[in-house]
Image (cartoon, helix red, strand yellow):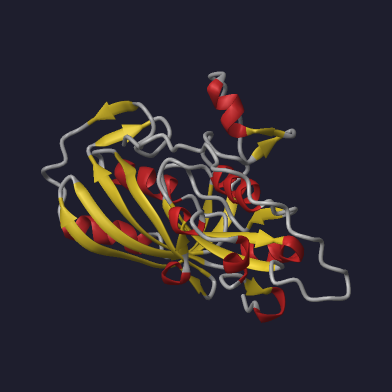
Amino acid sequence: MSVTTPNRSSSAKIPRRPRTPPNRRDPYDGILLVDKPAGWTSHDVVAKLRNHFQLRKVGHGGTLDPAATGLLVLLLGRGTKLSERVMGTDKVYAGTLRLGQRTDTQDGDGTVVCEHPYDGVTRDQVEAEFAKRRGDQMQTPPMVSAVKKDGVPLYKLARKGKEVTREPRLIHIYRFDCTGFEPPDVTFTLKCTKGTYVRTLCDDIGEALGCGAHLAQLRRTATGNLHVDQAHTLDALCRESVDALGAHVIPVFAFAP
């Protein structure tokens, strides 16, 4: 899957705002919901908004792969203290599984490593595989991931052609529903616990069906009680003034995971 490389060049810098005294509530302390565009890493979005608005402290509450779109929760100022609470919430996704091709990254950004006919695969078979994965299960993180081995992210080892043993992790799938079947593409919705690799689910399903598969598209629609419908596009935010930005921030005290 090809994505357009984003233009990350910033416009003229907005003057740094005065520091808020510690005993006063800062309108920029809290959560900002962004609808991440494809082609941007989560770090790119953080850096863009930090530099554009001259914010002192910005983080995020759970990364999205560059090709993925949807809800990215940014933590501003004292809102960074909410990181564990945000990252620990359940996630909801809408995605597309593509039958017939397996890739080395389990998604559309990778190189196709094998292809098989998929014309014999039925919707009933796909739905049966989805059903098998609901509930508790152990999942092994993919090599192309940010999980660390001896302090080194796995994706850095993968770039060197290395593969290491990874410890399986317990995940839970609450909902995994087929919403469309137009081979080779199968659309779905998924609700799962933190740390679930959706592309690994797609790769496993392709292997079970005997035709191979990969994650072709992914959009995060919810993180806990926060929904992408509440989010702002990156372009729209970058057209705002610093004063207007404060109106979009969910205050720390109002956050309910």
Q: Is residue 42 left or right of residue 182?
A: right
Q: Residue at x 54, y 71 (%)?
A: 224
Seen from this angle, which residue lies furthest top? 160
Q: Which residue is drawn at 33% across and 60% down?
A: 130
Residue 113 location, quadrant: top left
Measured as percent of width and height from the top left, residue 4 is found at 36, 36
Q: In this view, does 147 lie to the left or right of 141?
A: right
Foreground pick, 116 / 92 = 92
Mark count: 0
Q: Which residue is drawn at 23% across and 30% down?
A: 115
**In this orientation, does residue 227 appear?**
yes
Measured as percent of width and height from the top left, residue 203 is found at 37, 42
Q: Residue at x 33, y 55 (%)?
A: 95
Measured as percent of width and height from the top left, residue 242 is found at 62, 61
Q: Is residue 28 above or below residue 160?
A: below
Measured as percent of width and height from the top left, residue 111 is found at 35, 26
Q: Is residue 27 left or right of residue 257?
A: right
Q: In which quarter of the image is the N terminus?
A: top left
Q: Is residue 188 above or below residue 2?
A: below
**In this orientation, does residue 88 appear?**
no
Seen from this angle, which residue lies furthest left? 119
Q: In this view, does 23 lie to the left or right of 248?
A: right
Foreground pick, 157 / 253 = 253
Foreground pick, 88 / 100 = 88
Residue 178 location, quadrant: bottom left
Q: Quadrant of the C terminus?
A: bottom right
